[in-house]
Image (tube, rainbow, N blue to C red):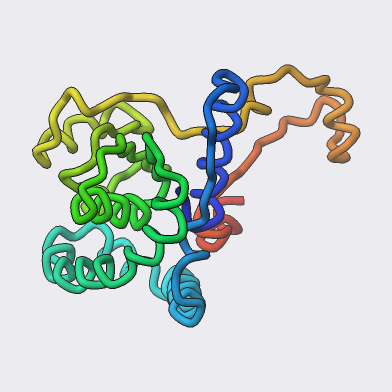
């Protein structure tokens, strides 16, 4: 289960790997926001893009501050409880998953709510897709965390997460990155000069931010 574009790419990478190495497993990939209110979805997207472009420091403050997290806890918990039922009826009830893998914190929150309120016993896995992790990933019903790097392990332990629930795996990437390709053909395809030192620059946040300044 994922939400925005980068999170969907991570979810797709996991789906590809499961299909490749465990073909007998039935997989259902879901975009979380398809089951939410369309007006709220548009408002959140516009708000996100505006904040990231105009006041990125404020976005960092919201996600990184524990004080803000606890101030918003009641509101976010209410929103999750109000919205989980549609997701449960449309996705969870018909499919009856044994494992739920979330590459977005909101998907993880809703899956945790469903697991608790509907007394489901599926294994809930959280896959943060950033090199930092914010408090909105921490839920008691998460069974396992797949982390992007080992430095985050101590942070989770400090938040009371059992060490047995933590795995260091890196951020999921497409199987295409593990395949060999002809460099000359790729340079020709992307119109890159032979012998030119090349850097692949990638950024999240739907491409907004300081990418131009980095270049």
Q: Residue at x 32, y 44 (%)?
A: 132
Q: Quadrant of residue 196?
A: top right
Residue 186 image position (x, y, % from top left): 83, 30
Does the image show residue 130? no
- Is residue 92 depicted above or below 62 in this figure? above
Q: Quadrant of residue 206?
A: bottom right
Does the image show residue 176? yes
Q: Quadrant of residue 96?
A: top left
Q: How many marks?
A: 0
- Is residue 36 depicted above or below 16 in this figure? below
Residue 116 image position (x, y, % from top left): 19, 51
- Is residue 187 depicted above or below 71 in this figure? above
Left or right of 116 in this view: 170: right
Nearer the observer, 178 or 108: 108
Q: Residue extending furthest front?
A: 94
Q: Residue at x 57, y 26 (%)?
A: 17
Nearer the observer, 145 or 207: 145
Residue 150 image position (x, y, % from top left): 29, 26
Left or right of 87 in this view: 10: right
């Amino acid at each position: 289960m994922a939400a925005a574009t980068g999170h969907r790419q991570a979810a797709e990478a996991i789906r590809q790997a499961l299909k490749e190495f465990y073909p007998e497993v039935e997989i259902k990939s879901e975009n979380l926001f398809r089951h939410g209110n369309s007006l709220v979805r548009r408002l959140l997207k516009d708000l996100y893009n505006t904040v990231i472009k105009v006041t990125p420091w404020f976005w960092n403050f919201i996600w990184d501050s524990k004080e803000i997290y606890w101030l918003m806890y009641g509101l976010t918990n209410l929103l999750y409880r109000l919205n989980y039922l549609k997701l449960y009826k449309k996705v969870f009830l018909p499919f009856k998953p044994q494992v739920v893998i979330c590459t977005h914190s909101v998907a993880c929150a809703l899956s945790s709510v469903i697991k608790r309120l509907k007394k489901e016993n599926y294994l809930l896995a959280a896959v943060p897709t950033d090199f930092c992790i914010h408090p909105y990933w921490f839920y008691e019903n998460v069974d396992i965390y797949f982390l992007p790097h080992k430095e985050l392990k101590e942070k989770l332990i400090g938040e009371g997460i059992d060490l047995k629930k933590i795995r260091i795996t890196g951020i999921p990437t497409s199987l295409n990155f593990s395949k060999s390709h002809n460099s000359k053909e790729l340079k020709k395809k992307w119109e890159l000069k032979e012998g030119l030192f090349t850097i692949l620059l990638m950024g999240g946040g739907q491409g907004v931010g300081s990418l131009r300044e980095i270049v």
